[in-house]
Image (cartoon, rainbow, N blue to C red):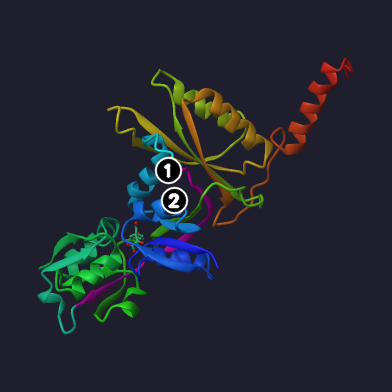
Amino acid sequence: MPSIAYFGPEGTFTEQAARALAPDADLLPMPTIPDAVAAVRAGRTDLACVPVENSIEGAVSATMDSLAADLLTTDTATRPVVALAEHLLPIRFSVLVRPGLAAADVRTVASHPHALAQVQRWVRANLPNAEPRVAASTAAAAVGVVKGEFDAAVTAPVASRHYELDVLATGVADESDAITRFLLLSRPTAPPAPTGADRTSVILVVSHRPGELAAVLAELATRGLNLTRIESRPLRDRFGEYRFYLDLDGHIGEQRVADALAALRRRSQHVLFLGSYPKAEGVAAAVESPFRDSDYADSAAWVTAIARGENV
Ligand SMILES: O=C(O)C(=O)C[C@]1(C(=O)O)C=C[C@@H](O)C=C1
């Protein structure tokens, strides 16, 4: 049975995602996202599950930075990780309070910053006397309420099964269709087989010269690749310089993607492959000529024939 480190404690949305991604796994809660990623990197667990982006609050920077850890240090213990799968979770919160407490008595409401950002309007309207407090995760906020540190916690619905607190409200969300995307990470291994509806993720560091990023993106465009996401995070040791996170449609097992990644490798200071894995929404897009594997095979055979003197 594989083991999964996940962003805990028990009762987070990440636990729900981990259960959905690997129903038979042994789940190990970690107090922070870097701890969960470090556990799989170091081989203490087989897998890790972490949130990567939310439709309202955007990228989860702790995850983005943890994924790039090997770009930040030469320490050989920080080996890369790759994503094997992703999961999309619709996000509706529950608000848990100390037993017996009424909404008007709530003075502090705690949660993960991403969660607080997704319920700002609801809190203003329904907990008029509450000040927001940041907790390490939604479930860590519930633990804080149990310990008497906060009056209320904005949590995943499953948290009410883990902590003896009153449920003040359910289905709480400023935007009713909020979604968080989670990744299942492992140490580097062969990617899962292509499904026709896959995503490939990379991190790039490009030279700080005019046109470098545009040149990288042109490598994708000329191979008909659909860029589905681009994010940047600071390099940390060079102010004003960034690394770029790219998600694109396709699988490294497909020629157009492999060819583009080889071009990125030639063009960039550093490319870190973060995996090719099935897209959670699973809608296969038809690959058209001249970007099909058969187009690449045909043109490669033509070049080989010419080199042999068989000019056809
Ligand atoms: O604290 C949790 O329950 C988490 O799993 C983290 C997290 C996040 O990082 O965005 C996950 C989903 C929600 O958007 C709120 C918090």
User: Is residue 102 visible in this depiction of the protein?
Assistant: yes
Quadrant where the C terminus lies?
top right
Q: Residues within 10 Å of mark 1 (few under 14, many from 20)?
A: few
Q: Position of residue 52 (x, y in %)?
A: 41, 51
Q: Quadrant of ligand 1?
A: bottom left
The residue sitting at 16% across, 84% down in the picture is: 100
Quadrant where the N terminus lies?
bottom right
Q: Main secondary structure of the magenta part?
A: strand
Q: Position of residue 240 (x, y in %)?
A: 29, 27
In the rendered structure, which segment of residues is drawn in magenta?
79-97
- On residue 42, the disc is 2
Q: Residues within 10 Å of mark 2 (few under 14, many from 20)?
A: few
Q: Nearer the viewer, residue 171 or 98?
A: 98
- On residue 77, the disc is 1
User: Is residue 80 in the magenta section?
Assistant: yes
Whether residues under marks 2 and 1 lie with C-beta atoms below 8 angstroms apart, the answer is: yes
Q: Amino acid at mark 2?
A: Ala
Q: Is residue 161 left or right of residue 23?
A: left
Q: Position of residue 173 (x, y in %)?
A: 31, 65
